Image (tube, grey):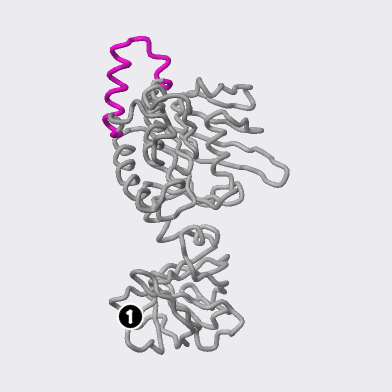
Amino acid sequence: MSLFINIEKNFENFTLKINFEHDASILGILGASGCGKSMTLKCIAGIEKPDSGKIILDDEILFDSQKKINLPPQKRKVGYLFQNYALFPNMTVKENILCGLHYEKNILLKEKIFSDTIGLLNLTELINHKPNELSGGQAQRTALARILVNRPKILMLDEPFSALDSHLRLKLQMKIKNLLKNYGRGVLLVTHDRNEAYRMCDYIAAMDNGKILTLKDTHEFFANPESVPAAILSGCKNIARAEKISDYKIFVPEWNITLSTKIKIKDNIKAVGIRAHHFSQSIKKNRNKITFIREMEEPFEYVIEFRFTGQSKESEPVWLRLSKDKKPEKFPEELGVEEENILLLY
């Protein structure tokens, strides 16, 4: 499976400008609400028409503004799971799923595809239920089954777990990820949840204000988000403007400290980021005196706010996260951070 998309669509106060390629893996499109994630899926599905550009799926042109090609949604062989699942309320689970098999004329093959799919998604006991009799997770699996029986070339999921409570969400993510891995074709998963993106996706495309900021391997994205907006999407809580001193040293005016880095610093450095769990009193590198401000207890961690000595009291405090078994009896006077854990943001 291969997807190529290079499109532009103008709105009154917003421009969607998307350019990336995707293969048979799970790609998460991570971004805040309103950044253009869902609109990107709608353009691929043919629900929305871009102003210019092209979309190619498995060497078939779905959209090309110059060649005046714009295939209708039903001819694009794209599976699109809407955020609200879009089940027909007057139909049973079986009838909803069979809607995805309307093209199949062979009755025996239709029954086999249906039987295999409901077995795969654990829906066998629910086939006579109506949507209003289903839980959120059951409705999601029914909607996914309706798409999968149609054997789309690419599967697109728009915030598929957002309507579920946290316990059910995690259980379903584990099951659905295994299903998607075995699906063997490309998957686009839109989400605003970085934890969901990390758990579910092989690659992440960080999106902001209608554009893809970066697209890279999931682990690499969290290790090096590259820009301030992407670092925020990745969950980094401590971000401050930075000035280059030398190839491996930067000054952070807001914190009034100098930091050394493992990676060579480019001239166009804008900021640094340090994740809250990377500070430690046992680390000797980038060690600075600090002043405790306050703490907040969570089920398994403490969130602690502090400032560096010399940091303005008007500036935002710095965050430290500590698991409960590692919290010291007395808050340390100094904290350090390893050079490889300094995020360089451009």
Q: What amino acid is labelled 1 in the image?
A: Lys
Label 1: how many residues lie within 10 Å, few (<14), some (14-19) or many (20+)?
A: few
Measured along the vertical axis of the image, is residue 328 above or below residue 244?
below
Task: Residue 42: give x, y in percent of width and height.
Answer: 55, 34
Location of the C terminus by quadrant is bottom right
Magenta stretch: give its range: 99-122
According to the picture, the residue beneath numbered tag 1 turns out to be 327
Position of residue 13 measured from the top left corner of the image (x, y, whole percent): 71, 47
Above or below 342: residue 184: above
Q: Is residue 26 magenta?
A: no
Q: How far across and down, in percent of the image, does residue 68 sit?
A: 63, 22
Q: How many marks?
A: 1
Residue at left 34%, top 80%? 283
Q: Residue at x 47, y 32 (%)?
A: 80
Question: Against 303, is 30 above or below?
Answer: above
Q: Residue at x 56, y 28 (%)?
A: 46
Q: Is residue 229 left or right of residue 284?
A: right
For the N terminus, which image quadrant?
top left
Looking at the image, which residue sits at the far front? 133
Nearest to the observer: residue 186 or residue 23 = 186
In the rendered view, tell whether residue 57 sits above or below residue 103: below
Would you say 53 lies left or right of 88 here?
right
The residue drawn where x is 49% and y is 68% is: 237
